[in-house]
Image (tube, grey):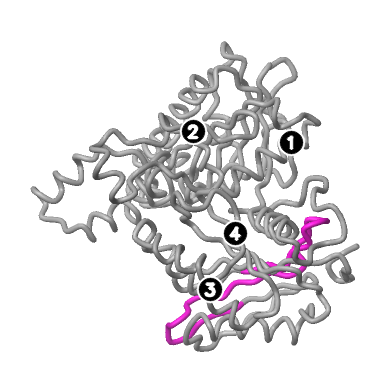
């Protein structure tokens, strides 16, 4: 059944991802894995905002002032009624919300109530750019959709299982405890979804697999997953640690911050802006789009070549580290925008690892991948896959499981179908 014909009696989930000046949303069928409708509200609070709503293969765009998140979400609900599908007949069983930081409080999804809202707000110092707008979206959605349960799904929850040796920073533990300083990890919804879908795709039990998942987008992270349980990840207290990213530095000697403050006179906010927005590929090459990086490399641009080399070197270092952590790796999976679409990065990341039983087949690897596919040759003991992530579907499924566990209305069918269509983190 196509989206133009879609009707459902088994229940849908409205997934909301609220940013500082934006709202992303999807109406998801958690059983079939279909995004029935989706959209984006941008430039909230500016002179002119934009809302794009996609349904039945057509996208409608409106440009008008959007005062705040409340106004933005009201516009979204209005477009559902005007363009479709009408929410009154979509049988929404839950609203699922993405929240970046769950701290040590949340090891899984949670039904939203006033206490959960308070606890998310209390975690805002750990994610000052993310949790407050996430919370605003939750509060507005609860006001506009009061008769349906709301569920929060945390980026950090999948990494709640990190062993102390992986989660602990070697600083004074009194300071660490007082200020919540530890490694939390991020992109957990994607890493959990992908590791589960890999097992399903291969016809294996997730409990039997040791996996490395490489979530490579503008933000990038790696994870080591043993038997479906995360045991290591590259991001830490914040999403800044780890791999080189589009505009973020990744791993950095912490004394660099002290050096810049003392010798360059840079403030905390200036250093924050430097490391999060003017570093990574952008800082090295002036571009954070790999299509441009590859074009510049082909033209002989030395800065672009160095940016690519630094990116790949860091990525290979993490793959090697996780090989050591896991001892045996059954599957390495590329996902997210770069991981799914950039065959050059995939090939370079694992080049020369044949003695370790890891290789990429050039023909299988070629091109963008919109469906799960094995890109390693048949002889390797470690399979290499590309598998599209779908965080919205993962949030929808977790929302349904949460309301069913709470005895609230859920879907009438199993929410554990075959692998779903691609989505991008």
Front position among marks 4 and 3: 4
For image coordinates 67% across by 44% down, the residue present is: 368
Tag shown at residue 129: none
Q: Residue 252 sits in which quadrant?
A: top left
* Disc 2 and disc 4 in contact, CB within 8 angstroms: no
Q: Residue 46 appears at what percent x and percent y?
A: 43, 83
Nearest to N terminus: mark 2 or mark 4: 4
Q: Nearer the viewer, mark 1 or mark 3?
A: 3
Q: Residue at x 75, y 85 (%)?
A: 81
Residue at 34% x, 38% y: name it: 251
Number of numbered discs overlaid on the protein picture: 4
Label 1 environment density (alpha carbons within 10 Å; few <14, some 14–19, many ≥20): some
- Pointer 4 or 3: first along the chain: 4
Quarter of the picture containing the N terminus is: bottom right
For residue 179, above or below residue 70: above
Give me the C-alpha separation between circle 2 and circle 1: 25 Å
| Magenta highlight on residue 39 | yes
Q: Nearer the viewer, residue 348 or 80?
A: 80
Is residue 185 rendered to the left or right of residue 140?
Answer: left
Q: Position of residue 152 (x, y in %)?
A: 58, 62
Q: Specify the segment rendered in magenta.
A: 25-51
Please name the residue that numbered disc 3 is placed on: 137
| Distance between mark 2 and mark 3 Cα atoms | 30 Å
Mark 2 or 1, nearer chain start: 2
Of circles 2 and 1, the one toward us is: 2
How many other residues sit within 10 Å of disc 3, few (<14), some (14-19) or many (≥20)? many
Q: CA distance from mark 2 to mark 4?
A: 24 Å
* Secondary element at tag 1: strand
Q: Tags 4 and 3 in contact by the CB under 8 Å rule? A: no
**Image marks 2 and 1: residues in contact by CB distance under 8 Å:** no
Residue 110's disc is 4
Label 4 to label 1, Cα distance in Å? 33 Å
């Amino acid at each position: 059944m196509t989206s133009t014909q879609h009707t459902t009696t088994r229940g849908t989930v409205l997934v909301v991802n609220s940013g500082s000046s934006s709202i992303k949303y999807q109406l998801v069928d958690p059983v079939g894995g279909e995004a029935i409708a989706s959209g984006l509200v941008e430039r909230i609070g500016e002179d002119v905002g934009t809302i794009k709503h996609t349904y039945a293969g057509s996208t409608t765009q409106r440009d008008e002032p959007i005062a705040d998140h409340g106004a933005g979400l009201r516009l979204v609900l209005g477009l559902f009624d005007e363009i479709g599908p009408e929410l009154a007949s979509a049988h929404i069983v839950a609203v699922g919300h993405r929240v970046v930081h769950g701290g040590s409080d949340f090891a899984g999804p949670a039904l939203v109530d006033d206490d959960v809202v308070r606890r998310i707000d209390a975690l805002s110092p750990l994610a000052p750019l993310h949790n407050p707008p996430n919370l605003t979206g939750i509060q507005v959605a609860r006001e506009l959709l009061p008769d349906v349960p709301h569920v929060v799904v945390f980026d950090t929850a999948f990494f709640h299982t990190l062993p102390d040796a992986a989660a602990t920073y070697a600083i004074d533990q009194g300071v660490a405890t007082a200020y919540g300083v530890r490694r939390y990890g991020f992109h957990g919804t994607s890493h959990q979804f992908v590791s589960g879908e890999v097992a399903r795709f291969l016809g294996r039990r997730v409990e039997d697999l040791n996996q490395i998942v490489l979530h490579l987008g503008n933000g990038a992270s790696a994870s080591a997953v043993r038997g479906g349980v995360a045991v290591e990840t590259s991001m830490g207290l914040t999403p800044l640690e780890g791999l080189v990213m589009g505009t973020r530095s990744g791993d950095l000697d912490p004394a660099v911050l002290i050096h810049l403050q003392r010798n360059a006179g840079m403030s905390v906010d200036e250093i924050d802006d430097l490391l999060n927005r003017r570093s990574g590929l952008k800082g090295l090459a002036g571009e954070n789009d790999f299509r441009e990086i590859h074009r510049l490399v082909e033209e002989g641009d030395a800065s672009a070549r160095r940016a690519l080399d630094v990116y790949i070197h860091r990525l290979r270092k993490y793959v090697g580290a996780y090989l050591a952590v896991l001892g045996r790796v059954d599957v390495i999976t590329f996902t997210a925008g770069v991981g799914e679409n950039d065959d050059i990065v995939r090939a370079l990341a694992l080049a020369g690892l044949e003695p370790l039983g890891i290789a990429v087949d050039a023909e299988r690897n070629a091109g963008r991948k919109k469906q799960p596919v094995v890109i390693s040759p048949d002889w390797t003991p470690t399979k290499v896959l590309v598998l599209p992530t779908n965080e919205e579907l993962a949030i929808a499924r977790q929302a349904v499981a949460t309301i069913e566990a709470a005895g609230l209305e859920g879907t009438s069918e199993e929410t554990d179908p075959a692998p779903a269509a691609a989505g991008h983190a």
